[in-house]
Amino acid sequence: MTQEVIFQTLGTLSGQSIGIVTLNIEKALNALTLDMVAAMQTQLTRWQTDDSIACVVLQGAGEKAFCAGGDVRAIYHASIANPNNITDEACRFFTQEYQLDYLLHQYGKPVLVWGDGIVMGGGLGLMAGGSHRVVTERSRIAMPEVTIGLYPDVGGSYFLNRMPGKTGLFLGLTAYNMNAADALYVELGNHYLPSDQQEPLFDAMADLNWSHDTAQNHQLLTDLLTNMSAAHRATLPMSHLQQFQAQIDLLMAGDIEDVHHQLSTLNTELEWLQRAQKTALAGSPISWHLIFAQAQLGTQLSLAQCFQWELGVSVNCCSNGDFCEGVRALLIDKDRQPKWLFSDVEAVEQGRIDLLITSPWDAINHPLADFT
């Protein structure tokens, strides 16, 4: 049986080691299972306090994906068997996934994420937690939750709301596939290297003069990546998101009905924008409302508060939203013909949204109460 996640250490000239985590379900595009999340939480927690580990690397097996998201089929089956009830499976998966993401954000030691190929949903949750986020010419980065009746979770409430203008709202509604230039523009990536530079990078990392000073180690890795990527970054075309920022802001201006009307009546020659438009308009009307509610959080909430808000919404989506139908249409029956609970954005009852964004726990009993 294939080991779903592989942990290795790479020796360095300084005598310290680099911990390497490889997501290893290539045929499933390295989608995260609960077992993988639990194994990573255990190993990364161990490495965090291990003085012999100077730095950690996260990568995906194969050339297609770093990680295409969370494997949500177990949640789907549990939710279908227990309609209108919050299931243990949903609570366990989202709680442990967010704990892992939060650990990465708070890690202290440098965490390099090799964001090659597909990085979507839960994969982006991992990548966003890395201190050094490398994108390549093959990177395809998206938050496609609108297509399954969810919303951009895994910390999206934090990072989407800190992007330029209305870009975060646009990415949430349209599931737009970012390339390397886009990811650098919105700061989901902070270094660019061609995919064939992975081995030279690891070789160079093994030659660095790592120490027990984490700040110094961060700087060492930053300097190495900056030097290696300088020549390559100059070859990148301008990001669509950057080039069309003003138009995106206009398209996303106003309330939910305004934005829906603007997207519905948009007439564009731009293929990437046509795809974004089509995905948004086919997405779950409930997801639209949740994505707007998320955008209204602004930048007031801390990262911890964002994850706490998201956990409530995510488990509620599994019991009282479009999530099960979205997963059925996309991943189970694969007919791509979801029958959403509401016919369009205007038909969604506010009471349904209030129910979905109301946490099932009080502050003391919240599963992520220890996030600070």
Image (spheres, helix red, strand yellow):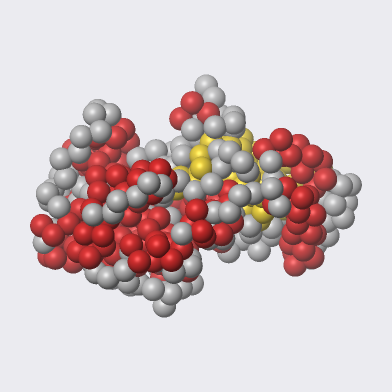
Q: Position of residue 106 (x, y in %)?
A: 58, 64
Q: Position of residue 115 (x, y in %)?
A: 59, 45
Side of 83 where 333 appears, left or right: right
Give the total number of marks visible in the rendering.
0
Q: Position of residue 293 (x, y in %)?
A: 28, 66
Q: Determine the image quadrant of residue 217.
A: bottom right
Q: Furthest-bottom residue in view?
A: 300
Q: Residue at x 36, y 43 (%)?
A: 275
Q: Furthest-top residue in view?
A: 1
Side of 69 where 55 appears, left or right: right
Residue 280 is at least partly visible in this image: yes
Q: Determine the image quadrant of residue 316.
A: bottom left
Q: Residue at x 32, y 71 (%)?
A: 296
Q: Determine the image quadrant of residue 3.
A: top right
Q: Residue at x 67, y 54 (%)?
A: 191
* Towards the viewer: 118 or 104: 118
Residue 158 is at least partly visible in this image: no
Q: Vertical placement of 25 versus 188: above or below?
A: above
Side of 349 where 293 appears, left or right: right
* Towards the viewer: 178 or 71: 178
Q: Position of residue 46 (x, y in %)?
A: 64, 52
Q: Residue at x 35, y 66 (%)?
A: 250
* Towards the viewer: 126 or 246: 246
